[in-house]
Image (cartoon, helix red, strand yellow):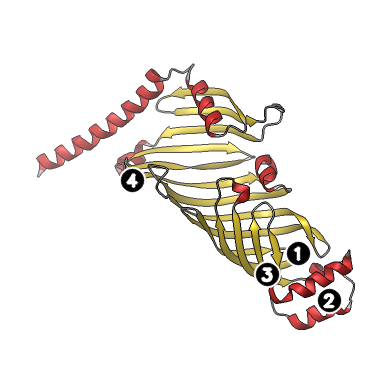
């Protein structure tokens, strides 16, 4: 029995040492320090050709790992204003985690948009894929100009999240992810006003996300605003161009007095209030992610009439 344990332990340690040695050889011998930033920039330019990429600094020491500073993606005509910036990316071998999980594990940490994204990557097997998990803390939406540009609207809020999932070994296979997302003190500009409101201010929004393949499920969504409290659920059909993804979300709103602020007490408004009688207002959000349309189900005709009166 002792001989079997020793053989198993020796084999696992041998695999671990081989993997670490391979990583070191890959970084140090195949791609020397001076060449590595250039090769990473070439990869980013190939993966995201709409932007020109640069890396301002790099350090590589073991066991501390790899540190990349000032990763920026800029448009060719405006290199002074990056659309994507990661202040710091750290990759570090997770030796205690590897010993416990008996898998190759790497810890990562990104500093961006005044916040932190941190977690671990674990290789479950060459045929299985890479397992990942992590947290998001303090990321500011105003510091992510690429997101506002994709959605073609102003955004603000502080993001926090926890997530986990699996990256497939090949692009032909589907991975998956689960996440809990929270946004505090948020603002979403509206391309078309709802009644007199040209933007949606909310104190907090939370939602659970589940992705598999080309579908992203939204579950247990809750939003709190001075205008209303609401619940929602639905899905997003993902597209190669993120802004072209299709959203289909349904929910209910409990209007607060400010929801009808600026609307005169006309016959249509009185009819809406009478039919609601304190009940929730149903809604549905559908269309491309960059420009979805909103309808209020059986109340849609009344809202359209009311909006015409406001013009």
According to the image, label 2 marks what residue?
269
Residue 25 visible in the displayed image: yes
Looking at the image, residue 263 sits to the left or right of residue 150; the answer is: right
Which badge, 2 or 1, comes first in the chain's sequence? 1
From the viewer's side, name the closer residue of 220 and 158: 220
Element assignment for label 3: strand
Kindly indicate whether the residue at mark 1 contacts the one at mark 2 (C-beta within 8 angstroms).
no
Whole-number angstrom distance, CA of label 3 to CA of label 4: 41 Å
Q: Is residue 12 above or below residue 252?
A: above
From the viewer's side, name the closer residue of 164 and 302: 302
- Which residue lies at the image location 72% right of the left edge and 54% below the top edge? 188
Element assignment for label 2: helix
From the viewer's side, name the closer residue of 204 and 267: 267
Instruction: Find residue 22 and report its horizontal and vertical position in percent.
Output: 32, 27
Kindly indicate whether the residue at mark 1 contacts the one at mark 3 (C-beta within 8 angstroms).
no
- Which residue lies at the image location 42% right of the left edge and 49% below the top edge? 175
According to the image, label 3 marks what residue?
283
According to the image, label 1 marks what residue?
226
Whole-number angstrom distance, CA of label 4 to CA of label 2: 58 Å
Whole-number angstrom distance, CA of label 2 to CA of label 1: 19 Å
Q: Quadrant of the C terminus?
A: bottom right
Which badge, 4 or 2, comes first in the chain's sequence? 4
Q: Is residue 288 above or below residue 108?
A: below
- Which residue lies at the image location 28% right of the left edge and 30% below the top edge? 17
Kindly indicate whether the residue at mark 2 contacts the one at mark 3 (C-beta within 8 angstroms).
no
According to the image, label 4 marks what residue?
128
- Residue 303 tag number: none
Element assignment for label 1: loop
Looking at the image, residue 273 sits to the left or right of residue 32; the answer is: right
């Amino acid at each position: 029995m002792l001989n079997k344990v020793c053989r198993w332990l020796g084999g696992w340690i041998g695999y671990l040492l081989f993997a670490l040695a391979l990583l070191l050889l890959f970084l140090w011998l195949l791609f020397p320090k001076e060449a590595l930033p250039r090769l990473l920039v070439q990869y980013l330019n190939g993966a995201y050709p709409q932007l020109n990429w640069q890396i301002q600094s790099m350090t590589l020491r073991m066991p501390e790992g790899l540190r990349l500073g000032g990763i920026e993606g800029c448009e060719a005509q405006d290199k002074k204003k990056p659309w994507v910036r990661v202040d710091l990316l750290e990759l570090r071998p997770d030796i205690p985690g590897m010993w416990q999980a008996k898998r190759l594990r790497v810890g990562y940490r990104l500093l961006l948009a005044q916040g932190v994204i941190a977690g671990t990557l674990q290789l479950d097997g060459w045929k299985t894929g890479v397992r990942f998990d992590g947290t998001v803390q303090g990321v500011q939406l105003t510091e992510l100009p690429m997101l506002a540009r994709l959605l073609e609207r102003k955004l603000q809020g502080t993001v926090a999240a926890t997530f986990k999932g699996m990256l497939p070994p090949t692009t032909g296979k589907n991975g998956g992810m689960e996440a809990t997302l929270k946004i505090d003190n948020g603002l979403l500009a509206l391309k078309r006003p709802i009644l007199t409101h040209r933007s949606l201010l909310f104190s907090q929004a939370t939602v659970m996300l589940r992705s598999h393949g080309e579908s992203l499920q939204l579950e247990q969504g809750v939003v709190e605003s001075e205008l209303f409290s609401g619940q929602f659920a639905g899905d997003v059909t993902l597209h190669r161009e993120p802004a072209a993804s299709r959203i289909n979300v349904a929910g209910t709103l409990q209007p607060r007095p400010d929801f009808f602020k600026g609307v005169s007490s006309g016959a249509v408004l009185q009819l809406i209030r009478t039919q609601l009688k304190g009940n929730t207002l149903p809604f549905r959000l559908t269309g491309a992610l960059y420009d979805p349309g909103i309808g209020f189900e059986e109340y849609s005709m009344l809202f359209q009439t009311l909006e015409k009166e406001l013009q």
